[in-house]
Image (cartoon, grey):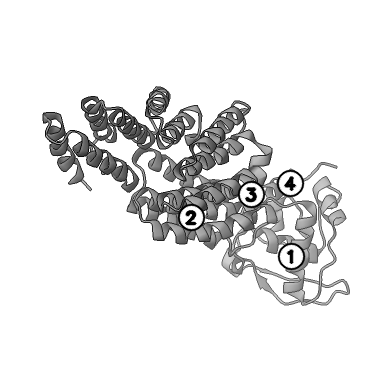
Amino acid sequence: MAANAILKNRMAELGLTQDELAGRMNTALADITGRPGDVSARTVRNLLNGTSRRPIGRTCAALERVFGCPVEDLGFNAPRTTHHPQEEDPVRRRTFIASATGTAAAAVPLVAQRRAVGLSDVARAAAGMNALVEADDRQGGHFELERAAATGRDGVLELQQRNASERVRRALYALAAEYTTIAAWSCIDARNLDQAQKYLNESATYAGLSQDGPTEIRVWVNLSMLAYQRHNWPEALAAAQAAQVSYAARRDPFFDSLGRVRAALAYAALGDGRAGLRSLKSAQDTYTRTMERERPRWTAFYGQAELDHLAAVVQFNSGRPAHAEAMAHRALAQIPAAFRRNKALATAQLALAQLQQGDAEQATVTASDVFTIMDGDPLPGRMRTLIGDFHRDLFVRAPSTAYARDWADRMRTEWSRA
């Protein structure tokens, strides 16, 4: 008596447990016959272990309703009353249900059932999301990325309208949250902050429904970043602290470090440099305990290089430009080439630190490298803000120098690309 590997694989594809399949079959029978079904987990075990190779008619009908295909495609021999001739047009196929007493039930077209959503659908949707993350790494936030992410979210929500196991449904909600967060992050990077807030409010709902720890902490981190861009430092700190106590942060030092460094940024912006530096050290110490494990694609940006980059920001805002310069150099030595946007941001931060120390000419050379790194692409709004800060500070410190005039000419040329 061989086990039914086909049924086992189809259940795995849909993310169904034995209890869940039994429940779905009972729901199908209630829809078909108007009476509750009596399929149990034991029934499903018998179907899986090969005990039941020719299920009774009502069991066949329930299986066909759940999986959207004839029972022959699930590894069973169908009873004569439910046999589907191979040459029959699927559009004309009908399943006839016999009750336990032999009473005929209404015919149900198989094609009327929408195909259930499985893990392969989740994988395809995730691949599309990962492609958007890679585009953001290269270029930063822009309108086309925002729209592509919103379209991806809409596609995932459409899948939610179809039959799915609890596991698959949670994964779809996590993907909806991820796509919506990408749209929000694109708006943050482009400085479209009101629209970013709307996306993040929506993303928080999907993250809660997904019950997925990494997805939840991503929303908190992005809420902290949005508040930071709005100069709402108390809210930035509160969101960072929420990230620190999240389920993912409690289980994985990687996420704990991410929450702590966001708190450090908020403290420094609030003018509490001492608390900012303490939180930064805590983030650095916590990161050293990080173990290699599989994490979502979006987390790839956060490593030692990005931690050093954010440390440069904390040091700069804490009034320590020399330390900020050192951390920016460390970051730039490690940021992977694929993370072009982050490399340009760290370069802008280095230029600000050099300018703050009075090395204005070298700072203009460094700031010009930002345009070289972006390679002709328009600067995201967040990067434009940093460059604008540098430009204003430069002309306060060295307004009549030749290198400042050269910088102004270069900046006008690059600014026109936006």
Discs 2, 4 touching: Cβ within 8 Å: no
Q: Earlier in the sequence, mark 1 or mark 3?
A: 1
The kind of secondary structure element at disc 4 is helix
Report, in whole angstroms, how far the alpha carbon at label 4 lies from the one at label 3.
Answer: 26 Å
Report, in whole angstroms, how far the alpha carbon at label 1 lies from the one at label 3.
Answer: 35 Å
How many neighbours does mark 3 have within 10 angstroms: few (below 14), some (14-19), or many (20 or more)?
A: some
Residue 210 location (% of width, % of height)? 63, 54
Q: Earlier in the sequence, mark 2 or mark 3?
A: 2
Q: Quadrant of the N terminus?
A: top right
Left or right of 408? Residue 91 is right
Discs 2, 3 touching: Cβ within 8 Å: no
How many neighbours does mark 1 have within 10 angstroms: few (below 14), some (14-19), or many (20 or more)?
A: many
Q: Which residue is mark 4?
A: 8
- Hey, what amino acid is under mark 1? Ala
The kind of secondary structure element at disc 2 is helix
Q: Earlier in the sequence, mark 2 or mark 4?
A: 4
* Camera-side residue of 22 and 86: 22
Which callout, 2 or 4, points to the residue nearer the camera? 2
